[in-house]
């Protein structure tokens, strides 16, 4: 099992969700996060005053999949989240050693 974690631009969330649903992937967790990388924040003007926004809003998507579904999910996320501009985000793939479905007690791949 692998966990796929993607940090993307917020307005791309629906496109990514639709791409994953098209692959038959239904369960995912979404969190609103802030961060910065090469974008290094940006300058905003509010009521005539200029200020720096150091952390930009992003969305973090997390899903746990069987090993054979990871590559197609990563490809779908990458295509759907791509704008071609800096700040499109990153995808991380992590090993998951154990999973338990709380309601039924099923574990590992049965819990997915």
Image (spheres, rainbow, N blue to C red):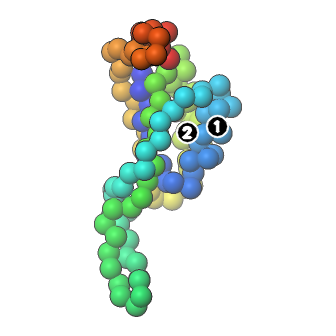
Question: Which mark is on residue 19?
Answer: 1
Q: On the picture, is 105 further left or further right than 17? A: left
Q: Residues within 10 Å of mark 2 (few under 14, many from 20)?
A: many
Q: Is residue 32 above or below residue 28?
A: below
Q: Residues within 10 Å of mark 1 (few under 14, many from 20)?
A: many
Residue visible at 33% across and 62% down? 55
Q: On the picture, is 7 further left or further right than 18? A: left
Disc 1 secondary structure class:
helix
The residue nearer to you, when weighing 39 against 56, is: 56
Residue 16: quadrant of the picture: top right
Q: Are marks 1 and 2 in contact (CB under 8 Å)?
A: yes
Residue visible at 65% across and 39% down? 18
Residue 101, x across and y down, in percent: 44, 16
Residue visible at 56% across and 34% down? 75
Q: Is residue 109 visible?
A: no
Question: Which mark is on residue 44?
Answer: none
The residue nearer to you, when weighing 67 against 44, is: 44
User: What distance separates the C-alpha of mark 1 from that of mark 2?
Assistant: 7 Å
Disc 2 secondary structure class:
helix
Badge 1 or badge 2: first in the primary sequence: 1
Quarter that holds the N terminus: top left
Residue 59, x across and y down, in percent: 45, 49
Pointer 2 residue: 77
């Amino acid at each position: 099992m692998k966990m796929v974690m993607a940090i993307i631009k917020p307005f791309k969330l629906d496109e990514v969700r639709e791409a994953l649903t098209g692959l038959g992937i239904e369960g995912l967790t979404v969190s609103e996060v802030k961060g910065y990388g090469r974008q290094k924040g940006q300058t905003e003007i509010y009521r005539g005053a200029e200020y720096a926004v150091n952390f930009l809003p992003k969305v973090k998507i997390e899903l746990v999949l069987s090993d054979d579904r990871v590559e197609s999910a990563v490809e779908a996320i990458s295509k759907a989240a791509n704008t071609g501009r800096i700040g499109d985000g990153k995808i991380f793939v992590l090993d998951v050693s154990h999973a338990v479905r709380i309601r039924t007690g099923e574990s590992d791949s049965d819990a997915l």
